[in-house]
């Protein structure tokens, strides 16, 4: 009876149908990575930017590109390189001799879904160009502000920091990503499946099968639906305790900001909606805690030397806190 009341309160059928269609389309091309795909879709529904990390060759860019292809929106791809300048991303003013005035030529950042490939290949000067547009959804050039069209989401891929030719992203920029998704190497069975598929089929033909499932207006309305999902006060308190503990943990040099608290709640709402529920549970919060926090917290140097990971610290923090029932 309770489930029937919840179902009548918020009809998630359109959202769930769209998610299933996107997943089914991706399953023909991407082997495994189910959790990563769920997180990308949750980030999209929670109006958050997403950082995807993995070694070269694990289909980070392909996954992001396929998600973008499933949405009928303006899509641009920017390849970050060491010589990329801020104007190459945002745009620049060009002198028009016909009217003797400068005109602003928009850069590739002006779109709905922006795939930034290998974001950590560019130095801090170019990274800083993204601060305003990622947070405020606008660009200011020569004193003029240009608003971005909704929806606006950045899907960025990066190689592990230890790899040659990479720069560590500034903490302020990392905090603007709702998730950091880690793509691992496939299992032996998955790798055999990948090789078999690539051997038997033409990847170009596969890409043509991905058809748009959602329009930009659909995304905007579904985000409003997700935003309105029910959250018990005790779950808000549970989230605040997790973040508060990151700021007082001996293993951490830097804890989560209030933006991290909001990101956990918004992400938990999106994950609940993907699962067909219009209310969140403690498991939703626990499930998104690591992807939301792993790029926001910083380990102390001694813990880093010991090989401790941010995910392990997050798990230890959650274990200490009583889970609301």
Image (cartoon, rainbow, N blue to C red):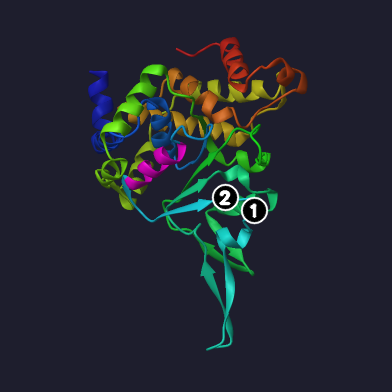
Snapshot quadrant of residue 195: top left
* Magenta segment boundaries in residue numbering: 60-69
Q: Is residue 82 visible?
A: yes
Q: Quadrant of residue 145?
A: bottom right
Q: Is residue 45 visible?
A: no
Task: Tell me the residue at 56%/54% (across/down).
Answer: 133
Query: Do the CB atoms of the residues marked 1 and 2 lie less than 8 Å apart?
Result: yes
Q: Residue 34 appears at what percent x and percent y?
A: 37, 26
The dominant secondary structure in magenta is helix
Q: Nearer the viewer, mark 1 or mark 2?
A: 2
Whole-angstrom CA distance, mark 1 to mark 2, is 9 Å
Counting residues from the start of the chain, the first of labels 1 and 2 encountered is 2
Residue displayed at 48% across by 29% down: 183
Label of residue 126 in the image = 1
Residue 80 tag number:
2
Relative placement, left or right, of 128 versus 225 is right
- Left or right of 279 on screen, residue 180: right
């Amino acid at each position: 009876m309770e489930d029937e009341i919840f179902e009548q309160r918020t009809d998630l059928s359109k959202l769930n149908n769209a998610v299933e269609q996107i997943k089914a389309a991706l399953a023909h091309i991407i082997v495994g990575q189910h959790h990563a795909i769920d997180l990308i879709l949750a980030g999209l529904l929670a109006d958050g930017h997403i950082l995807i990390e993995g070694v070269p060759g694990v289909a980070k860019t392909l996954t992001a590109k396929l998600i973008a292809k499933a949405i009928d929106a303006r899509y641009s791809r920017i390849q970050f390189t060491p010589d990329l300048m801020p104007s190459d991303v945002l745009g620049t003013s060009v002198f028009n001799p016909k009217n003797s005035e400068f005109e602003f030529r928009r850069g590739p950042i002006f779109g709905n879904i922006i795939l930034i490939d290998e974001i950590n290949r560019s130095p801090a000067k170019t990274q800083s160009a993204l601060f305003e547009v990622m947070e405020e959804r606008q660009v200011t050039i020569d004193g003029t502000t240009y608003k971005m069209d909704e929806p606006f989401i950045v899907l960025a891929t990066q190689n592990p920091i230890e790899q040659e030719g990479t720069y560590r992203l500034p903490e302020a920029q990392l905090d603007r990503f709702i998730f950091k998704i880690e793509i691992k190497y496939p299992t032996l069975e998955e790798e055999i499946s990948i090789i078999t598929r690539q051997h038997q089929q033409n990847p170009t033909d596969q890409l043509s099968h991905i058809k748009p499932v959602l329009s930009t207006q659909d995304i905007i309305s579904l985000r409003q639906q997700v935003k309105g999902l029910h959250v018990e006060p005790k779950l808000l308190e549970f989230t605040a305790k997790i973040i508060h503990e990151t700021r007082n943990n001996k293993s951490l040099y830097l804890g989560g900001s209030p933006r991290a608290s909001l990101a956990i709640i918004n992400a938990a709402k999106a994950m609940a909606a993907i699962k067909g529920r219009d209310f969140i549970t403690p498991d939703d919060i626990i499930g998104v805690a690591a992807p939301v926090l792993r790029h926001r917290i910083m380990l102390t140097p001694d813990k880093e030397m010991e090989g401790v990971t941010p995910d392990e610290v997050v798990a230890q923090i959650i274990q200490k806190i009583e889970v609301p029932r």
